[in-house]
Image (cartoon, helix red, strand yellow):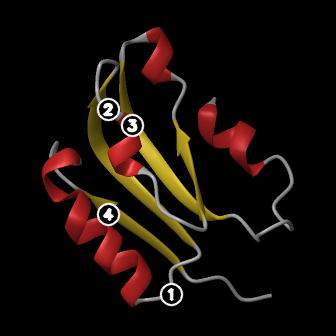
Amino acid sequence: MSLNIYYWNCAAGLLKKIDYIKELITGNNVDIFFVAEAELKIDSDLSVLNMSGYDLIVSQTFISRKKARLICYKKKDIKELSGFDEKIRS
């Protein structure tokens, strides 16, 4: 199985750039999309980040440090990556 994986450093602007990110993911049939420097704060409305057909994985720092610096979108139908979600969250 070949996966289309993207990585993007959004320079602390995840919520400001979410429409662009969603267009990039859907327009390029991305399977897994990492966003670095997301700087997503604990009081952020996560519902705006939801995408149909994708799981949103947020790094564990979201709880421990009250902000997430790394997030990941993963297509829901990808089953081959057992343990992937847990490794990203750690």
Q: How far apart are marks 4 and 3 (CA)?
A: 19 Å
Place of residue 75 in the rendered image (x, y in percent of width and height, measured from the top left): 64, 68
Residue highlighted by disc 4: 8
Give the SS element for disc 1: loop
How packed mark 2 is, by other alpha carbons closer than 10 Å (few <14, some 14-19, many 20 or more), is few
Q: Name the residue under label 1.
A: 29
In three-dimensional space, the C-alpha distance between marks 1 and 3, rounded to whole angstroms, equals 22 Å
| Front of the two marks 4 and 2 | 2
Residue type at the position of mark 3: Leu
Q: What element carries label 3?
A: helix
For the residues labelled 2 and 3, the Cα–Cα distance comes to 4 Å
Separation (CA) of disc 4 from disc 2: 21 Å
Query: Given this view, does label 2 or label 1 mark the residue nearer the observer?
Result: 2
Say if 67 sits above or below 37 in the image: above
Q: Earlier in the sequence, mark 4 or mark 2?
A: 4
Tag 2 residue: 45
Q: Position of residue 5 (x, y in %)?
A: 53, 75
Residue type at tag 1: Asn
Answer yes or no: do the residues labelled 2 and 1 have beta carbons within 8 Å? no
Residue with the mark numbered 3: 46
Q: How far apart are marks 2 and 1 (CA)?
A: 25 Å
Circle 3 Cα neighbour tier, 10 Å, few/some/many (<14 / 14–19 / ≥20): few
Q: In this view, does 61 lie above or below 72?
A: above
